[in-house]
């Protein structure tokens, strides 16, 4: 279809009157081109000064009346159209009306001066888990924080700070997701049966699962303590959650006052193109670059007054003032990472703004980022820069099959676990196979193995992300649902020399960042040695988090004399503490995989490739027996081991090609 679209545009750019556009739309619909792509083609071939919009033409085009061979009139002589030659023509949908299934239990479209509070009395949140899908500007946060008997949680401290001064669910009613721990620790949980829990930015329950899994799982587990729960976001659908049977699903729309437009650039050397583009913009601009090194380079290379906003500088006076004032004032450009997609609110009264996005982003995140500008009256212009690349082949994500496989594995693991009987060996089993369970989307809690529904939802969101990345029509269609005009993408090439200079500048910034990290950690070593640990509000996040990790290891038995060594190792290896905590949890039983490997190596400093293969096969077969309950078929198709092993009659061996 893309080749046909290009051929039509090349042959008839700027030539077609109304009637010719109408016939072309019918013909393209008949062969199965989607409405969005047809509109983009018509935009390119329309003669200047037309009065009937291409959106109207496409909406009224009836493919049943199309003379499909007429498409040859729209392309150069000799051009082949495979969709006609092979008669691959989509069947036209039946015109017999069918009763639509209601997607929501209630649906409202608000006027400019209306808010959620004006329609909330028609909603029922008194029981169960409910989903409120409400656009930006509907006043959903303000509404809920004014209600009685409500606990309100949000993912970011910046959101909580915008509501009040107290981040606590015990001393107050508003807190971050992490504050849910206070609910879990509460001995008398019966008091929560009179309360409603409101979870703001609930898309984070699956989007952020990759690095917040523990917090998210514990948050979801507390739902059972409350009278009712309300999940709240402007960019989700009920189908995104596999584990939650919603009691009610409500949709509240509030059309944007400003016109929203997206222009996509398929680039080579996109860093160079990005910098040049930002320099040529004149409106207030926010830039999303989820790469701190490049963000720093862009900040220095653009000739507009700018402010960098990311986790590394969030405590600086300038950034704190920016978040507090909620205004750009004399800043022309704000450059940030994903950490500013939520929580940042820019409330300047503006007519036109520019939003620049570097690298792939799903439509939901684009909508969230654009909404950082709260008061725009005329236009929001999104400039979206991605790499030019080949389309990926994507396997279908069959969520029902994934759920079924995870359930079967839970049953098998439960049997193995209960057969062990000795408590210390049961604990060893859970610790030994915790990583495998995470990869297989199951987890252990209070004596039972459970399906990680949220992990599956996270994978499903990643699948949608791949689809958006490889299907521009799907990407554009979703943005259209959010009220965007999506322009046809164009290809641009950056300058080779400039791109090389940017690459070198990023390398310098990275080296400076590595050195700064080293100095910060070395200062912590010195402070431990001199017993002069800084106050939390006077230290960096890295300093504080490292100090906390050291305290946990000391509590688990690490000698104080090893503190300097541990931090020095962390300077060289950012995964050191994760390994150290895992090591601290390990204990010998005489039957662990670790002990088996030590016995097999038997003190040797080197082993042959044959010995290595033999040890690997023994590990795989031990896992087969202990983790998969001797079910070879389950192991072969599993996520944790399937790609590493091959079936060999009644055993398995590690594939030599892996």
Image (cartoon, rainbow, N blue to C red):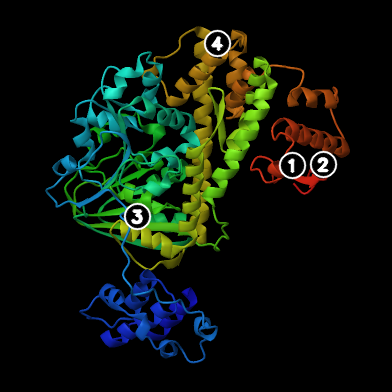
Q: Residue at x 31, y 39 (%)?
A: 130
- The residue beneath circle 2 is 650
- The residue beneath circle 3 is 278
Q: Which mark is residue 228?
A: none
Judged left or right of residue 35, residue 388 is right
Residue 12: tell me if it is visible.
yes
Q: Residue at x 35, y 43 (%)?
A: 341
CA separation, marks 4 and 1?
41 Å
Other residues around mark 4 within 10 Å, as few (<14) / some (14–19) / many (≥20): few
For the residues carrying marks 1 and 3, which lies nearer the camera in this image? 1
Say which label, 4 or 1, has the lower sequence index.
Answer: 4
Say which label, 2 or 4, has the lower sequence index.
Answer: 4
User: Mark 2–mark 4 contact, CB under 8 Å?
Assistant: no
CA separation, marks 2 and 4?
45 Å
Looking at the rendered structure, the number of numbered marks drawn on it comes to 4
- The residue beneath circle 4 is 555
Disc 1 element: helix
User: Mark 2–mark 1 contact, CB under 8 Å?
Assistant: yes
Judged left or right of residue 433, residue 169 is left
């Amino acid at each position: 279809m893309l080749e046909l679209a290009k051929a039509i545009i090349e042959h008839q750019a700027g030539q077609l009157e109304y009637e010719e556009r109408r016939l072309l739309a019918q013909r393209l619909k008949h062969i199965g081109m989607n409405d969005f792509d047809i509109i983009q083609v018509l935009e390119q071939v329309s003669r200047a000064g037309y009065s009937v919009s291409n959106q109207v033409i496409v909406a009224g085009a009836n493919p049943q009346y199309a003379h499909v061979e007429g498409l040859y009139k729209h392309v150069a002589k000799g051009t082949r159209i495979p969709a006609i030659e092979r008669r691959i023509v989509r069947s036209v949908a039946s015109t017999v009306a069918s009763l639509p299934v209601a997607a929501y239990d209630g649906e409202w479209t608000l006027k400019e001066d209306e808010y959620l509070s004006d329609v909330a009395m028609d909603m029922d949140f008194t029981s169960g888990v409910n989903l409120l899908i409400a656009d930006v500007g509907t006043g959903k946060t303000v509404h809920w924080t004014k209600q009685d008997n409500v606990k309100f949680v949000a993912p970011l401290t910046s959101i909580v700070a915008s509501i009040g001064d107290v981040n606590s669910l015990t001393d107050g009613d508003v807190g971050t997701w992490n504050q849910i721990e206070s609910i879990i620790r509460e001995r008398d949980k019966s008091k929560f049966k009179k309360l409603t829990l409101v979870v703001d930015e609930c898309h984070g329950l699956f989007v952020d699962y990759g690095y917040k899994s523990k917090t998210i799982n514990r948050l979801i587990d507390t739902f059972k303590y409350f009278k009712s729960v309300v999940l709240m976001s402007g960019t989700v659908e009920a189908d995104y959650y596999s584990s939650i049977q919603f009691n009610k699903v409500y949709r509240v729309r509030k059309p944007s006052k400003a016109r929203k437009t997206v222009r996509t650039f398929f680039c080579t050397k996109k860093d160079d193109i990005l910098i040049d583009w930002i320099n040529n913009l004149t409106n207030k601009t926010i830039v999303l670059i989820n790469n701190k090194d490049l963000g720093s380079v862009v900040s220095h290379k653009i000739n507009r007054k700018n402010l960098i906003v990311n986790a590394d500088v969030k405590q600086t006076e300038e950034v704190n003032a920016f978040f507090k004032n909620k205004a750009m004032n004399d800043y022309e450009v704000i450059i940030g990472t994903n950490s500013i997609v939520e929580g940042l609110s820019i409330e300047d009264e503006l007519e036109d703004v520019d939003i620049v996005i570097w690298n792939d982003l799903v439509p939901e995140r684009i909508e969230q980022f654009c909404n950082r500008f709260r008061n725009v009256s005329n236009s929001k212009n999104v400039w979206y820069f991605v790499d030019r690349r080949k389309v990926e082949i994507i396997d279908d994500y069959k969520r029902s099959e994934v759920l079924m496989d995870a359930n079967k594995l839970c049953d098998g693991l439960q049997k193995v676990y209960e057969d062990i009987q000795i408590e210390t060996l049961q604990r060893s089993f859970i610790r030994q196979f915790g990583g495998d369970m995470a990869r297989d989307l199951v987890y252990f809690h209070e004596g039972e193995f459970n399906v990680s529904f949220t992990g599956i939802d996270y994978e499903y969101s990643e699948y949608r992300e791949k689809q958006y990345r490889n299907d521009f029509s799907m990407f554009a269609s979703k943005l259209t649902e959010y009220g965007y005009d999506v322009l046809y993408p164009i290809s641009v090439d950056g300058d080779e020399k400039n791109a090389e200079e940017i690459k070198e500048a990023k390398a310098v910034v990275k080296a400076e960042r590595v050195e700064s990290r080293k100095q910060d950690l070395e200062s912590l070593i010195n402070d431990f040695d001199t017993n002069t640990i800084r106050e939390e509000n006077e230290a960096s996040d890295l300093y504080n988090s490292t100090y906390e990790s050291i305290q946990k290891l000391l509590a688990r038995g690490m000698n104080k004399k090893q503190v300097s060594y541990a931090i020095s190792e962390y300077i060289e290896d950012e995964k050191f503490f994760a390994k150290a905590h895992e090591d601290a949890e390990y204990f010998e039983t005489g039957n662990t995989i670790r002990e088996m490997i030590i016995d097999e190596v038997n003190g040797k400093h080197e082993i042959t490739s044959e010995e290595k293969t033999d040890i690997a096969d023994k590990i795989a077969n031990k896992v087969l027996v202990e983790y998969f309950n001797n079910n070879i078929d389950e192991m072969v198709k599993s996520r944790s081991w399937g790609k590493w092993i091959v079936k060999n009659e009644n055993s398995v061996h590690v594939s030599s090609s892996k």
